[in-house]
Image (cartoon, grey):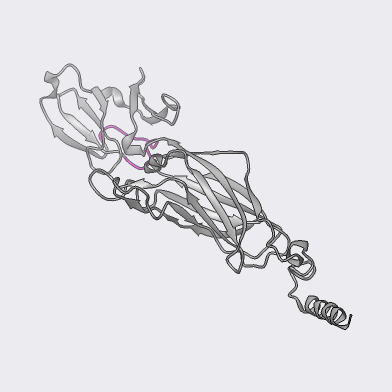
Amino acid sequence: MPRVRTAVVAAALAASLAPVAFGGPAAFAASPAAAAGTAAEPGTVVQEGGRLTVPAGEEGPVTLRFTATLPAGVQGPVSASFELDTWLAEAAGGGSPVSADVIRSTCSVNGVPYGACAWDMPYFAPSLPDPPVRPSLGLPEVPAAGTLTYTVTLDADRTAAVLGRPDVLVRLTDGTGATVAAGRLGLDFVVGTPTAGQRGAVHARDKDGVLWRYERRYNVPYGPRQRVGGGWNTYTAIAGTAELGRDTYPDLVARDGAGKLWLYQGTRKPSAELVPGSARTLVGGGWNTYDLIF
């Protein structure tokens, strides 16, 4: 009997000295699982709204939200791993198949902004059967809480389309490295609007000599027209081209009545007024021998 009493007193003393969790009772001491000598069951990770479509192009960022529910008594800080269940194969000519900043992300947790979060995009030879490292996002380390809601923006460029439709493996660990929550998310990277120098456009001149531009857009044939400028009825032929000026923006050529062909280099503001005769470069003469320029 004395031995039993000593054990009870010792257990009570240990409980009174146990560390206190944020806003709650003594950590672990009041947990039935801990009292039984077993680890608490890890919590869940749930994505808001189901799988997220991420355009790989010029559309701008989309927002991913997911919530992790942690078991009672978790001690912080809490770390999170965010890894795609796919891998990148080396490009045909060697090197990475994606750009250096293929995805730009910002992160916040429970409404607290943590700024930019960096992606790691390792790539391997296609012959490698099981790459050791997969694409991943570095999420911030945060204090423990019953629920942690992550908000991540994803602004992907056109090279992100090679990622396809991966699942995301998310795992949260506590200060001891034990898993406290885990789950899967879904991202669908789809081909989006190319950069300005890579998307097609149609130019049209109306009866008043105003030139309009119809630019290719994501998932639609052409977007709303943009005014290029007036006075273009001085030319006998006008054609849009690729980036002849090597500045990554599509250009425009126009032939005047004397048969001279002029080059108008594209700008970062394709909707800005472009006046005939301004900022043009002479390509050459004799172009009136052609009945069509395209």
Residue 249 spot, x, y in % from top left: 30, 39
Closer to the camera in the image, 106 or 163: 163
Closer to the camera in the image, 225 or 288: 225
In the picture, which quadrant includes the C terminus? top left
36 drawn magenta: no
Left or right: where does residue 294 sit relative to residue 196?
A: left
| Residue drawn at (59%, 49%) of the image | 183
Can residue 209 be seen in the rendering of this structure?
no
Residue 154 spot, x, y in % from top left: 50, 47
38 relative to 102, above or below: below
Quarter occupied by residue 10: bottom right
Left or right: where does residue 37 sit relative to residue 292?
A: right
Residue 221 spot, x, y in % from top left: 41, 24
Total numbered circles: 0
Residue 35 spot, x, y in % from top left: 76, 67
| Residue drawn at (47%, 48%) of the image | 84
Left or right: where does residue 244 sit relative to residue 178?
A: left
State the predominant SS element of the stretch in magenta.
loop
Quarter occupied by residue 201: top left
Closer to the camera in the image, 62 or 168: 168
95 relative to 271, above or below: below
| Residue drawn at (37%, 52%) of the image | 131
**Name of the residue lying farthest toward the right:** 1
Q: Give the range drawn in magenta.
A: 267-277
Left or right: where does residue 86 sit relative to residue 78?
A: left
